[in-house]
Image: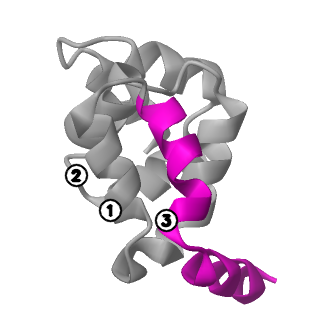
Amino acid sequence: MIYVLMNKLRKMKYAEVFPEMLRLADGNPGAMVFLMELMADKNLIHAIPIASKITTCPTLKGTNLYVLYSDLGNKDFALICNICLKVPDNVLEDACSRQDYSGIDLIKPYL
């Protein structure tokens, strides 16, 4: 099943997903970079858990999305995927809303 979804993501054109990416980035260029890199072939294995978490956490957009990518995930898609799989939604949303790196301490117990 996961291979079917990955193949579907691989075949999608940026034109099809770009409006949604713009909405999620909410004017934050770092969040847009994260979303664009997520669609790269080398990161597709991690795309499904990350995209799933983004859809279940309504505050994961814009700056909060960039905090997930840069501060919490250190721009490492394997780590971001692990965070998305293991950290509860409410904890992750709280951690991503902190721009002072204190969110790292919130998610550590789950990793």
Q: Is residue 53 at all visible to an observer of this figure?
A: yes
Disc 2 packing (10 Å; few <14; some 14–19; many ≥20): some
Residue picked out by circle 1? 37
For label 2, the SS is loop
Residue picked out by circle 3? 14
Between 96 and 31, the one lying in front of the other is: 31
Q: Quadrant of residue 98?
A: top left
State which tag comes first along the sequence, 1 or 2. 1
- Give the label on residue 75, or none: 2
- Check the image and report above or below for 45 versus 17: below
Position of residue 108 measured from the top left corner of the image (x, y, whole percent): 36, 33
The Cα atoms of the two marked residues, 3 and 1, are separated by 12 Å
Give the magenta-colored segment's residue range.
Answer: 1-25
For the residues carrying marks 3 and 1, which lies nearer the camera in this image?
3
For label 3, the SS is helix
The quadrant of the picture occupied by the N terminus is bottom right
Residue depicted at 52% across the width and 20% down the height = 93
Confirm whether the magenta stretch covers residue 97: no
Residue depicted at 35% across the width and 81% down the height = 42
Residue type, mark 2 in image: Lys
The Cα atoms of the two marked residues, 2 and 3, are separated by 21 Å
Position of residue 45 measured from the top left corner of the image (x, y, whole percent): 51, 77
- Check the image and report above or below for 107 versus 3: above
Q: Main secondary structure of the magenta part?
A: helix
Q: Quadrant of residue 3?
A: bottom right
